[in-house]
Image (cartoon, coloured by chain):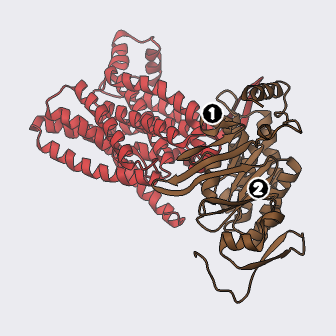
Chain colours: A brown, B red
Amino acid sequence: MNPLTCRLRKALARAVGQRPLPVPIGAPMAQSAPRLAGRDLTLAYEKRTIAEGLTVDIPDHSFTVVVGPNACGKSTLLRALSRTLKPAAGTVLLDGRSIADLPAKQVARTLGLLPQSSVAPDGITVAELVSRGRYPHQSVLRQWSAEDERVVAEAMADTGVADLADRAVDELSGGQRQRVWIAMALAQQTPLLLLDEPTTYLDIAHQIEVLDLCARLHREQGRTLVAVLHDLNQAARYATHLVALRDGRLIAAGPPAEVVTADLVEEVFRLPCRVIPDPETGTPLVVPTANRRIKVGA
Amino acid sequence: MRTLRLAHFSLRYRPRALAVVVAALLLALAVAVLALGRGDFPIAPGEVLRTLFGGGSPAEDYIVNQLRLPRIATALLVGAALALAGALFQTLVRNPLGSPDILGFTQGAATGALLVVVAGGSSLALAGGAIGGGLATGAAIYALAWRGGVQGSRLVMVGIGTAAILTGLNGYLLTRTQLMDAARAVLWLTGSLDGRGWDDALPLLIALAVLAPAVLLGCGPALRALELGDDAASGLGVRPERVRMVLLAAAVLLASLAAAAAGPVNFVALTAPQLARRFTRVPGPNLAASMCTGGALLVTADFTAQHLFADHQAPVGVVTGVLGGGYLVWLLATQRRAGRL
């Protein structure tokens, strides 16, 4: 569909108070382009280039997980998709338009971000931190609407931090704190949510807790989630769509059952392994082979 | 946290923060009225109030509105401007020590003013020199700290280095002045409100009238988002570098104008926001409470400086220096005990 029709559609949807209508079934490929995609991205910090010519689609309503070895550009890709990092070349498309050209607050109403490192101001309470997620919906004359109140309460209930509302964020456990930050991103009410290593620094029980929460947000609320994860088995278990990177190149993308094979794991991580069905879920489970010679970095 | 709603409009405030703002304002006004009445020609507070609203005798009108009011107004405005600048710097660099007198902006304003003194310029030129010096230093520090964006810690380091260089330069400039000029310069460098007229208060009044609402209402929410870190702020729809640059510019302008009006008064920018924060018990920038606390602090310090010694007046900077220094030591001691420093 051409941009004009697309915009008309959205205007119409807004006028009747709905999210933009889904693209009709059976439409040609070009029309079903995903809401978020990176095209020919060259990503670099100062002089160091992380990725070149990287093209990635984030399927709508998927739980996409980006995997790959350390320093493969996973987080960098996520930063570019969330507009935190400006690509040296190429474009990130959000609803068919370059994300760099869209007003910042408008982007923030469509796409939420849970960054790897955030700072909770000294002594801030949970409810207050979550409230700050309403920023893109507020203005000088509209500082705190009944809607803001409702959404913040809902976000805290969804993440199970409602009981902690009046506690100071700096006295919470790591797992609780991560759920509070997720609640803040949820309060932004965005159909797309990007999470940069949401499980890092958490013990395994808290990792699973956070991933279960993500899966629920995806399944029950129909949000599109994109997460960077280190653990391939967790990625295979929770993702509906996997993106595997190595050295800033896209090696494979698709459902975990198709992507996670022994050959691919060897190619991406340089790790000889067997892939067996997870006894709990049937999703691929990577088991490194014994007596192997370590070839990391080869 | 309370909310006022009217149709589509809503306003959010905290009762305690509002109480602090009101209390600080009342304290500032009470001290101002006392100060307006004290002097070689004492006037009772009731008379002062009546005179302020145009009901006094011609003599009282002259003494209160022409002689004493400009000084008090300058004190209130300088205090508010320094406190707002301090609150902005401290939030932007995430450091309670990040205030214009530590980051070199005040020293830059002093350099500008001293250059004018050496060149033999008028009082007006001296104010202009202070503003120019402050703004130039601000631009230089921002440029030196720039590396694909400006980070708080780098800004602090570059600022402290610049402050040291400028302090040295200021010492050198002092040696190049005539004795009379040097005495005037030293008085200015301590920070003094002596003999301030409406000419000194007016530029600051205009700047505050424009910048305070713009910063408080326009950038306050973005500043609170920026407190969460650049990435989180950018995720919320704030452009971190742009907001930082605008707010730094506003803070440097306020600090320079304050220095132009009263000299580099020490420690108000550092102390007022911290005090305000402890009064309101609210995390975050506390801009409005800081401004009011700053005004109250400086007008009180000036009143003390004027009347502490029976035989002579001390410059206000001496009092704020002593108060602020003591406060700083206390802050460091308690932060150390809390394991945060």
Identity of the residue drawn at 89% across and 39% down: A25
Q: Nearer the viewer, residue A56 or A110?
A: A56
Element marked by disc 2: strand
Q: Would residue A243 be seen by someone viewing this image from the given angle?
A: no
Q: Which residue is mark 2?
A: A64
Q: Residue furthest left?
A: B178
Which residue is nearer to you in this view: B301 or A40?
Answer: A40
Considering only vertical position in the picture, is B271 above or below B184? below
**Element at label 1:** loop
The percent coordinates of residue A159 (x first, y second) are 80, 54
Chain letter for mark 1: A
- Residue at the (30%, 49%) spot, across then down: B163
Gap in Å between the C-alphas at discs 2 and 1? 25 Å
Is disc 2 surrounded by few (<14), some (14 to 19) or many (20+) residues within 10 Å? many
* Three-letter code for the amino acid on which mark 1 is drawn: Pro
Query: Are discs 2 and 1 less than 8 Å apart at CB?
Result: no
Tell me, for residue A181, which label it has, or none.
none
Q: Which residue is pictured at 75% across the width and 46% down the height?
A: A192
Question: Which of the pair B292/B63 is nearer the observer?
Answer: B292
Image quadrant in which the C terminus of chain A is located: bottom right
- Residue A89: where, in percent of width, then height? 54, 45
Name the amino acid type tagged 2.
Answer: Thr
In the rendered structure, the answer to whether residue B136 lies left or right of residue B288 reads left
Which mark, by number, is residue A103? 1
Q: Is residue B130 above or below residue B275?
A: above
